[in-house]
Amino acid sequence: MNYDTVAAISTAQGEGGIGVIRISGDDALRIADKIFYSVSGKKVTEMKGYTASFGKISENGEDIDEAVALVFKAPHSYTGEDVVELSCHGGLYITKRVLRAVLNAGAVPAQAGEFTKRAFLNGKIDLTEAEAVIDIISAKSRGAARSALCVKEGALRKKIDGVKNDLLSMAAHLSAWADYPEEDIAEVTADSVIETCDNAIKCFKSLLDSYDCGQAVKKGIDTVIAGRPNVGKSTLMNLLSGYEKSIVTDIPGTTRDIVEDTVTVGDVVLNLSDTAGLRDTDDTVEKIGVDRARKRLEQCGLLLAVFDNSRELDEDDYALIESAKLVPSIAVINKTDLDNKLDIEYISKNIKYIVYISAISGDGRDELTKAVEKIAGTQNFNPSEGVLSNERQRIAVKNALDSVVEAMNALKCGMTFDAVTVSIEDAISHLLELTGERTSDEVVDRVFHNFCVGK
């Protein structure tokens, strides 16, 4: 495919050790030759693929910076095209100045995600692998990074390809057997169709069942820390954050607004909100904070309901326990280093998961991690199996599942194999949309619109 030769800064724009300007396209090497001068005198167009050369970036006789030119020859490059990466000193001015020189030499600015889009269009990766690139960049935890890398390396594609090929073979067999009865083609049996459909359904359901788990690892769970004043909510927030995020005092009502942070607990990302202590108050400012806390509690994906081990349950605690019944919750019994006055039995009857901690010392954090992973379903999370990473992928698999189930129902109702074939072909079409082998330009543009420029 012939496109303009494009260029962009591929490293984060800011001060750093190096900055990389990537050039991709048919004229990449020739454009680099106009501004890069190696100390050896060798031109970029004379360099072999996967080799580097040290020299200077110059324009109109003015030296801009020292740089290393790294050459990749088509089709053995990220984009599948000729690529030159110029590594210069990092910094806003220098990287932009080098990029301007590249553009003045004949390149055009790359659009958001254009390098990865070209890799997709040139058959280097499928659409799921392309989407994994942005997941790798935005990963907030080890689990999210591992999961995205496995998808980038083809874990999801291989799983989908296995089912897709089975369905393709069955659809082809059904069509050939129906269209060419005079040929010596093995008869299609209902049992063979059911076996293939059963295997597909199991695969699709497994992917869909693991979707929420994958989202918890990738995007995180909106988590609220709630409880009456002075039970240790802010201390717990600081424990999980690893630094003094929330102000901690002995004065009730210290936290008057929602304090937020993103932390990793085990393999789960928690989008934490430390809220105002839940109680009736005449303080106007504190009341606003309490109202916000209650509203956030109703909308959260996980509630860490904090109780003071050294104090008896009061009306605010009972109200919190009732709220905990409506959302996934963990009862966090804090201040376990003090004498117990709390009615643990009542809490355990109403909240399934209970952990005991001393937020000030950190004791019990491992137990809290295990409870979070159980609720998120990530305790047995295996990123190497390949997971669905976004709603586009989930919908495609759900549609494929519905089509296969439809084929099974048609068979059980005694309909002809022609009707079964139509449903199987619909399932195949949805899988082709998933991988990008058959999809609209609008979908492709939407996928790469979310990428940063330079990737």
Image (tube, grey):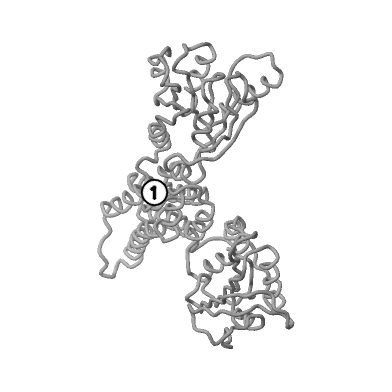
Q: What quarter of the picture does the C terminus occupy?
A: bottom right
Q: Where residue 59 appears, x then y in whole percent?
A: 71, 80
Give the labeled residue for mark 1.
204
Residue at 45% in and 25% down: 332
Reply above or below: 454 against 23. Answer: above
- In this view, the residue in front, 299 or 186, is 299
Q: Where residue 273 appears, x then y in whole percent?
A: 57, 32
Residue 427 located left or right of residue 314: left
Quadrant in which residue 166 is drawn: bottom left
- In this view, the residue in front, 310 or 288, is 310
Classed neighbour count for the residue bearing mark 1: other residues with Cα under 10 Å, few (<14), some (14–19), many (≥20): many
Reply above or below: 355 against 124. Answer: above
Reply above or below: 202 against 50. Answer: above
Residue at 61% in and 81% down: 27
Q: Amino acid at mark 1?
A: Phe
Q: Where residue 291 appears, x then y in whole percent?
A: 64, 22
Q: What quarter of the picture does the N terminus occupy?
A: bottom right
Quadrant in which residue 64 is drawn: bottom right
- In this view, the residue in front, 44 or 23, is 44
Q: Where residue 190 appears, x then y in whole percent?
A: 28, 52
Residue 221 located left or right of residue 377: right
Q: How many marks?
A: 1
- In this view, the residue in front, 111 or 136, is 136
